[in-house]
Image (cartoon, coloured by chain):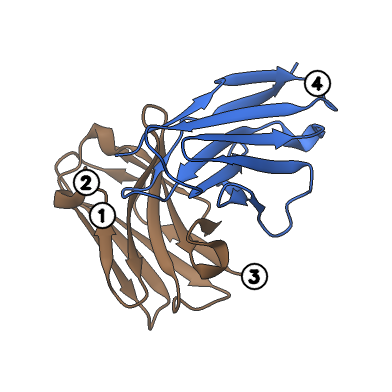
Chain colours: A brown, B blue
Amino acid sequence: QVQLQESGPGLVKPSETLSLTCTVSGGSISGYYWSWIRQSPGKGLEWIGYVHYTGSTDFNPSLRSRVTISRDSSKNQFSLKVKSVTAADTALYYCARSGDDSRGYPDYWGQGALVTVSS
Amino acid sequence: EIVLTQSPATLSLSPGERATLSCRASQSITSYLAWYQQKPGQAPRLLIYDATNRAAGIPARFSGSGSGTDFTLTISSLEPEDFALYLCLQRSGWPHTFGGGTKVEIK
């Protein structure tokens, strides 16, 4: 059974960089798209971006200038960085997997990591 | 960006009743729509993909219909575990976007 687990600081100061890692167990990163999706009371669910197992990426245009997503196949992990954060970046951050077997829709999700932006 | 509008915001029903949830897209997304169920403290769970196909392990009481801009999720007879938040997701255009959700609550 594939499992995803987010990890990283729960509190980030304004203007600093938010960093999260998703560790995948029970399966390989190969063959799939790996996404970061966040959820906040004000904006609902927002797709931040994804990294393909080949390393290709795409990002939500609203966040593109501030976001980096990368993968480390040797560790079966992928990571998110959001720079210059503000209170609007406070959210529950999910990592998720999409692939051919789910027709491109996220079918496995992590439990979510709450990140608060505050001084 | 494609906007998904879900209605109603809240649906108050009793166990055994039929639930009909709507998701409307701001432009045609053909059949590139999924439905998710989310319970408090949990990640979303994939129910339906490509508008009409049940995901693995999803009970037959869940069904999806529609294409183009108008989509419906139907729960034929509500079980106690079905009271939750339901979300639609489109992957026709980038960025992929979610609807605001319909909360199905116990009447």
In the rendered structure, find residue A59 and report the number of the disc placed on it: 1
Can residue A35 be seen in the rendering of this structure?
Answer: yes
Q: Distance from label 1 to label 3 (Cα)?
A: 28 Å
Q: Which residue is mark 2?
A: A63
Q: Amino acid at mark 3?
A: Gln
Marked residue chain, label 2: A
Residue located 49% across and 67% down the image: A99
Question: Can you say whether B90 is above or below A5 in the image?
Answer: above
Q: Secondary structure at mark 2?
A: loop
| Quadrant of the frame with the C terminus of chain A | top left
**Disc 1 vs disc 3: which is toward the camera?**
1
Marked residue chain, label 3: A
Please identify the quarter of the rendering in which residue B26 is found: top left
Residue located 27% across and 65% down the image: A57
Q: Secondary structure at mark 3?
A: loop
Q: Amino acid at mark 4?
A: Ser
Please identify the quarter of the rendering in which residue A15 is found: top left
